[in-house]
Image (cartoon, rainbow, N blue to C red):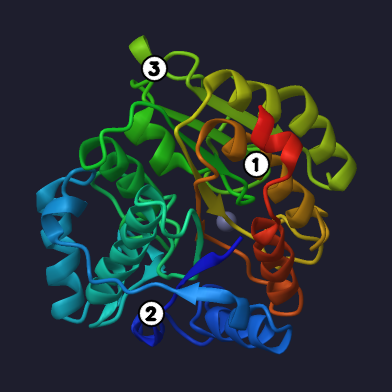
Amino acid sequence: MVVGWVYDRFFHRHRTDETHPERADRLEVIVSDLAAAGVLDRMRPLQFQPAPAEIVGWVHEPAYVELVRLACEQGFGFIGSSDTKISPESYDAALLAVGGVLGACDAAMSGEVPRSFCAVRPPGHHAERDLAMGFCLFNNVAIAAEYLIRRHGLKRVAILDWDVHHGNGIQHIFEERRDVFYISIHQTPQSLFPGTGYEREIGHGPGEGFTLNIPMKPGSGDREYHGVFDTQVFPRLDEYAPEFVLLSTGFDATRGDPIASLNLEPSSYGWMTREIAEIANWHSHGRIVSVLEGGYDRVRLGQCAIEHITAMMDEVTDADAER
Ligand SMILES: [Zn+2]
């Protein structure tokens, strides 16, 4: 299956600083390793435009969107907290990142390219409705979910977030709704930023039961992830029967990542992707849009992306198609 590729050099113009873990060279590593492995040649580059601020405002407070624009334009060095750096072109890069993800959603909904990987930055899953945090400005994946519901009329969108950090922004945006099912697997909140994502956080009101948090103890790896996929992720997604699967793809749960303490291998992203593809093939016409979040180990980052993307390329098997 052909996998779409969302990437633009302009994403590099969101500048942080030389010692910041979330720097543009993350994308350079991913692009060069995908190219060297021959994977990039097999992907289909998608065309996309910056998202209109109005659509970003479906999820974020319009006053917040404007604040990000002004803060970048006026040369503030950071926004929200000192670790969330911005540069003059960060606002435009962030709108382009959102636009790329929306373009991938459109390509999936038209049936043209059912699956895509979006190598975008800045990342998004920590961004709250009205607050930048954790290196994130606009919540790329949350905006995509809202877009699939409003623009494409979907009623059940699943978001699986396997970034090592809890995606507080996505959870808070959708925790009172059942049209988005948010599942996050992350290092325990006691031991890692942002300190949310306890098992007891399951959503509120009509959204109760449509947030699933799976905290993992420091040191957890492939075996523990297999366990939670078998007992929680796979059965709960199957039961929800999503019409679309969005992935918040952080690669920072990998052994050796400089800012976390889990021990996945690059190959783990291969099997996890195949499990999700099975769900997508059964329920979602195969549709998956995967969006880069974190991942800071330059040595293994590219290999993680290769394992993830080549697993998305796997053809639908006859057994899948019969279900
Ligand atoms: Zn992360």
Residue 236: x and y, percent?
62, 22
Q: Is residue 124 left or right of residue 309?
A: left
The residue at the point 77 percent across, 23 percent down is 231
Element type at marker 3? helix
**Is residue 216 visible in the rendered structure shown here?**
no
Mark 1 or mark 3: whose residue is earlier in sequence:
3
Label annotation for residue 11? 2
User: Residue at label 3?
Assistant: 207
Q: Nearer the viewer, mark 1 or mark 3?
A: 1
Residue 301: x and y, percent?
69, 72
Mark 3 or mark 2: whose residue is earlier in sequence:
2
- Label 2 to label 1: alpha-carbon separation: 27 Å
Quadrant hosting residue 279: top right
- Label 3 to label 2: alpha-carbon separation: 34 Å
User: Residue at label 1?
Assistant: 276
Quadrant hosting residue 243: top left
Element type at marker 1? helix
Q: Where does the C terminus fall, quadrant-wise?
A: top right
**Dots 1 and 3: beta carbons under 8 Å?**
no
Tell whether circle 3 marks a residue whose Cβ is less than 8 angstroms from ligand 1.
no
Q: Residues within 10 Å of mark 3 (few under 14, many from 20)?
A: some
**Is residue 308 visible in the rendered structure shown here?**
yes
Q: Could you say which is closer to the camera, residue 196 or residue 185?
A: 185
Q: Is residue 57 left or right of residue 190?
A: left
